[in-house]
Each structure stands twice: as C-alpha cells, then as structure tokens.
Amino acid sequence: MGTQLVNETKNISISQELRKADTYLGRLIGLLATSSLSTEQALWIERCNSIHTFFMRFPIDVVFIDRNLKVKKVIENVRPWRFTWPVWGAHSTIEMPVGAIRRGRIEVGDQLHVGH
C-alpha cells in the first residue's frame, strides 16, 4: 500500500495510492504519460495553483489545496484539452479519477491528510 489521502473533516479515505509530483519534470509530465487512473490512485502536484489537460487521454477531478492541505476549490470532470484559472490561495493540486470528489465528499474548507 502506498501513501494514503484522507478527507480528515469527514473521515473518508480518498486514495490509497497518492503519488507526489514535486520535481520540475514530475510536475511537467503529471498524468500525461498515464492512460487512466484506478479509483485508488491520485497525483499530488506541488507548487501548482492551476492545471491544464492538454494531451491527456481521460477526464479528471481536481482539488486545489493550500499549504496546510485545506481545500480551496474543487472541479469535477475536467475533460481533456481544458485549463483552469489560477486559484487564489492554492499551493498544490490533487488530480484524481472522475467521481473521487463525490466519493470523498470533498468540499471547499475540508481538511485533507496525507499519511501511511
């Protein structure tokens, strides 16, 4: 089992396989080299307050968080060839398979937790 992502506010597991993109190359590639995500997978992109889905092969749910992992904005079902405007106060994004926001009942203001 990998790193776990939990909606601490609602005590709901969101992902059992959270991967972190904290290098320039990791942030640049993101999910572009991925053909799909399982319901247990997610990508945490540090130092990122907006995203694009150019060249992606599938839609994603996106959660924007501040430095303390508090949710600033959620966007469901971002289809390929889209972009988001920068989110004020966001430090990172978490990209997940479509449906993850609903399953995790993630809302603005929720506190997330990353751990093992």
Image (cartoon, rainbow, N blue to C red):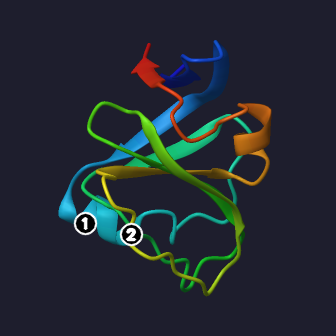
Mark 2, secondary structure of its residue: helix
Residue at image mark 1 = 25
Corner quadrant of residue 30: bottom left
The tag on residue 111 is none
Q: Amino acid at mark 2?
A: Ile
User: In which quadrant is the C terminus drawn?
Assistant: top left
Q: Amino acid at mark 1?
A: Leu
Q: Which residue is located at x 40 percent, y 69 percent?
A: 50
Q: Crowding at label 1, few (<14), some or many (≥20) Cα neighbours within 10 Å?
A: few
Q: Which residue is located at x 67 percent, y 61 percent?
A: 60
The location of residue 114, given as percent across then percent down, is 42, 23
Q: Nearer the viewer, residue 79 or 66?
A: 66
The location of residue 37, given as percent across then percent down, is 68, 51
Q: Nearer the viewer, residue 5 or 86?
A: 86
Q: Which residue is located at x 61 percent, y 87 percent?
A: 81
Q: Give the side of residue 13 with respect to residue 5, left or right.
A: right
The location of residue 2, given as percent across then percent down, is 49, 24
Residue at image mark 2 = 29
Q: Nearer the viewer, residue 73 or 40?
A: 73
Q: Crowding at label 2, few (<14), some or many (≥20) Cα neighbours within 10 Å?
A: few
| 3D distance between C-alphas at marks 1 and 2 | 6 Å
Q: Nearer the viewer, residue 115 or 85?
A: 85
**Number of numbered labels in the structure image:** 2
The location of residue 9, given as percent across then percent down, is 57, 18
For the residues bearing labels 1 and 2, Cβ distance under 8 angstroms: yes
Q: Give the side of residue 107 with respect to residue 90, left or right.
A: right
User: In which quadrant is the N terminus drawn?
Assistant: top right
Q: Give the side of residue 101 with respect to residue 3, left or right.
A: right
Corner quadrant of residue 61: bottom right
Mark 1, secondary structure of its residue: helix
Residue farthest along the left direction in this orientation? 24
